[in-house]
Amino acid sequence: MGRPQITTQQRQARLGERHRLVAPRRTDDVAEIARDLVALHATDPATVFLSAAIRMQNPAVATIEHALYEDKTLLRHHAMRRTVWVATPDITQATNAACTRKIAKRERTQMLKYLGQTPGVDDPEATLAETTNRFIARITEAGPLSTRAIGKLDPDLTFKVTAGSGKFTAEVGAHTRIGALAAFEARLIRTRPAATWISSEYAWELIERWTPTAFDEPDDAAGMATVVRAWLDRFGPGTERDITWWTGSTKTAVRKALAQIEAVEVELDDNETAWLNADDDLLDGAAPNEAPDESWVALLPSLDPTVMGWKERAWYLNDDYVPRVFDRNGNAGPTIWADGRVVGGWAQRPDGSLAYELLEPLSSAQQELLNVEIERVLALISDARFRVRFPSPNQKELLGE
């Protein structure tokens, strides 16, 4: 018996429901939204709020902030591909084991190298230990503090470190690197920002004072198995290349995880091998669904988990559009989706209005849905103004720059 075959149409048809992009699947449970995407990209602070809000019945910044900073059903932590993510505590624990621990070791080695090439530092190990202890002591004494506030309290921590190598070096305050390394090592966690929801100047807090989540558990292999299972549940079918890229891990680790969770091989339209969890509905023998149950349109922010979920994107993004909506480093700008495909891009103008570009024509019904979604996004953003941290090539044109 051959491998089960999964069509592009099947993948597109269920994407809206699985990623809560169809209206009946919207919810105000922000933790459930994050779980249904495994995790929310948080490198750009606006992404967390926009990614969650467009999947909510009653979009509200305050509801998302409550989940992050009051209920703490979501945590902000470094994970896959050295990126900052927002996820539920159990997923954060798993991604820390699967990804962050390895990254933390590399970050520590790099920091010691930077200290070693900094004038006046004779013993990088001792300097790092002393400055880290002082950085953490300030937080222990005064509660959540931003890096800027810690620098003002202890100016000696702001000595310059030469970071980078070759032509690409820069002098940065040591305290900025110390805080980041302590976060990679699960000693500190990012809490509420000093300003608004679009600010990235977060306050640091001791991780054990913020959450009871045990970051010394599970072991690396178990963490990777949990992460891969969660990804397949929400993004499968996926190829080995998709999973390796998304996790930022090695093929060896991914293959071990696939074997551990007993994932099932399937065949995609291009005859490529992909994987599904053994309990996936696509394996139950039901007739293929060639169209979504309900037409949908969504405006997704830059770096939204849906557009960033796969390395191989041809099934939902025409190859010709990639240079329009992705930058050279693989960061996606804000996108417009219709029934499982990227059909355009959008941007917020300085006056708060939205500009958009359609790469494919919409039906009259889809255009009506797009108009509704534009109004939903405008209502959420209100008076806030933000710039995409990693603008896609179409952003300048949309903004007339």
Image: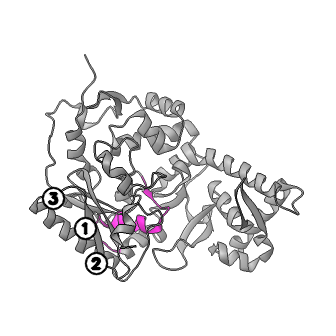
User: Please, which residue is most extreme toward the left here?
Assistant: 364
Residue 136 visible: no
Q: Which quarter of the picture shows residue 263? A: top left
Disc 3 versus disc 2: distance between alpha carbons? 23 Å
The image shows residue 292, relative to residue 152, as above or below, that is above
The magenta segment: 39-60
Residue at image mark 2: 379
Q: Quick one: label 2, few (<14), some, or many (20+) residues within 10 Å?
A: few
Q: Which quarter of the picture shows residue 212? A: bottom right
Q: Magenta span has 371?
A: no
Q: Magenta span has 43?
A: yes
Q: Could you tell me which residue is drawn at 77 percent across and 52 percent down?
A: 113
Q: Nearer the viewer, mark 1 or mark 2?
A: 2
SS at badge 2? helix
Give the mark, 3 or 2, whose residue is nearer the N terminus.
3
Image quadrant where one finds the C terminus:
bottom left
User: Which mark, by number, is residue 57?
Assistant: 1
Display coloring: one colour
The residue closer to the viewer here, 283 or 6, is 6
SS at badge 1? loop
Residue at image mark 3: 362
Is 169 displayed left or right of 347 in the figure?
right
Is 139 displayed left or right of 244 in the figure?
right
